[in-house]
Image (cartoon, helix red, strand yellow):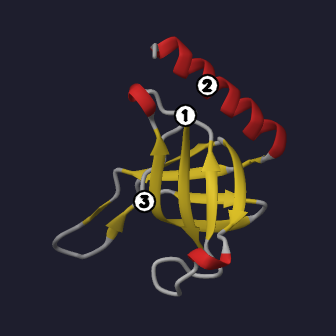
Amino acid sequence: MSEAFYNSIAATASKLITKFGAVGEIKRTTGGSIDPVTGVPSAGTTVIYTPNTIVQKYADELVDGARILSSDRMIILDNTIEPVSTDTITIGGENWSIVSIRESNPAGVPLVYFVQARR
């Protein structure tokens, strides 16, 4: 299949997530460091991205109490920003940390990201 086809699929996925989801915030802090002499951390730069998201509970049969907790959520993100494990996601005023990230990426074209998130 061609890249144009997958770009069209990605656009459709983004439209559906926009229609049925909500705007979230991804906070990414970079550039912080710790002074090796004093041990005092220096502030990094925080950038906020606003992808469209859908939040879902995990099916009961997937919850094992170790890898997936009953309070975990699957957050589906459009392809406007690729999440990284150190990001924080805020949706509806609730902050979530990222446990794991999977992407749907046929032929090298990211369609959506599936984030396992935990409070």
Sequence-wise, which precedes: disc 2 or disc 3? 2
Sequence-wise, which precedes: disc 3 or disc 1? 3
The residue type indicated by label 2 comes to Ile
Mark-to-mark CA distance, 1 and 2:
7 Å
Q: Residues within 10 Å of mark 2 (few under 14, many from 20)?
A: some
The residue type indicated by label 3 comes to Thr
Mark-to-mark CA distance, 3 and 1:
21 Å
Q: Residues within 10 Å of mark 1 (few under 14, many from 20)?
A: many
Q: Could you tell me which quadrant the C terminus lies in?
A: bottom right
Residue farthest to the left, as pictured: 37
Q: Which residue is located at x 45 percent, y 27 percent? A: 109
Q: Nearer the viewer, residue 54 or 41?
A: 54
Examine the rendered structure and indicate whether residue 58 appears above or below residue 107.
Answer: below
Examine the rendered structure and indicate whether residue 9 appears above or below residue 93.
Answer: above
Examine the rendered structure and indicate whether residue 88 appears above or below residue 62.
Answer: above
Q: Nearer the viewer, residue 72 or 42?
A: 72
Mark carried by residue 111: 1
Sequence-wise, which precedes: disc 1 or disc 2? 2
> Tag 1's secondary structure?
loop
Q: Nearer the viewer, residue 1 or 86?
A: 1
Q: Quadrant of residue 71?
A: bottom right
Q: Which residue is located at x 45 percent, y 35 percent? A: 105
| Residue bearing the label numbered 2 | 9
User: Of the residues tagged 2 and 3, which is closer to the observer?
Assistant: 2
> Tag 3's secondary structure?
loop
Give yes or no for contact between labels 2 and 3 (Cβ–Cβ under 8 Å). Answer: no
Residue farthest to the right, as pictured: 19
Q: Can the viewer see residue 45?
A: no
Mark carried by residue 86: 3
The residue type indicated by label 1 comes to Leu
Give yes or no for contact between labels 1 and 2 (Cβ–Cβ under 8 Å). Answer: yes
Mark carried by residue 17: none
